[in-house]
Amino acid sequence: MRIDLIGRWLMHLAFPPVCRGCGERFDIFKTPDPLPLCPDCLARWESVVQRRAQQGAQGMPQALAESGCRAMFSRVTYHPGQKQLAERLLLRAKDHRDRPLFRFFAEDMRLPLWQLLEQYGDATKACIVFVPRRPEAKQRAGHDQGEQLALALGDALELPVVCALQHRRGTSAQKQLAAAARAENAKSSYLPTKHAAKLRGKTVILVDDIVTAGTTLAAATSLLLEQGAAAVVAATVASASPDIPS
């Protein structure tokens, strides 16, 4: 344990860590193993979470509800035009393979997600599936943010991550399409993998970073239920503000 701590300290000395929210550099002599957020940004994040909780859940997008999804959990509301703290963190997650940031999201979501799982039986027998990124986008970014979030959640909840979905190559990005075309595009975008058989009879946490109209999660939910999943609970870091055109 001590060797591990010394190793992390030496790495921080060579590559000084910064707050993912504001970019401020941490003083590693005062904070040898800092969180991804400085105290000020952490307080802002908690304020955003509390504000969403006070406003109440916005309900499940219609497309997702119609797919048979049992429930949807999201931590914050996403306003892409504002670029406030939550938006900056989600953009960083999309563009960078920042494992400490994904661990932060996962730990922040862990308790409420576990409580939600317990409503559908034995939470210890659930598993996690992520919505895969388009291959072209994953190749450009060098990572899949949904996969990274799922792995971090798997560690936080001590649940297995099953790579049950694969993305067809050559499909269009959802954000490039009008609302009417998104549902059909999403339905044709995913295929089950050979690992999908592991889902039979289990509650599945379906993970993505952001939900907007819900068509992507709806298509993935329908496919997972067809593969034998007993129930699907969608989990995202954020849900898009309802004033965003769907």
Image (cartoon, helix red, strand yellow):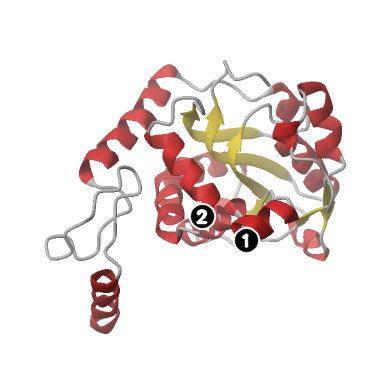
Secondary structure state at the residue bearing disc 1: loop
Q: Residue at x 40, y 58 (%)?
A: 100
Q: Residue 161 carries which label?
A: 1
The amino acid type found where label 2 is placed reads Leu
Q: Is residue 17 above or below residue 173?
A: below
Q: Is residue 153 above or below residue 181?
A: below
Q: Residue at x 84, y 36 (%)?
A: 185
Labels in figure, total: 2
Instruction: Tell me where residue 205 appears, x and y as whole percent.
Output: 62, 47
The amino acid type found where label 1 is placed reads Val
Instruction: Tell me where residue 26 appears, x and y as whole percent.
Output: 21, 56
Instruction: Tell me where residue 171 appears, x and y as whole percent.
Output: 83, 45
Q: Distance between the residues labelled 1 and 2?
A: 9 Å
Q: Mark 2 points at which residue?
A: 153
Secondary structure state at the residue bearing disc 2: helix
Q: Can residue 202 be seen in this view?
A: no
Circles 1, 2 touching at the beta carbon (< 8 Å): yes
Q: Give the position of the C terminus as an image quadrant.
A: top right
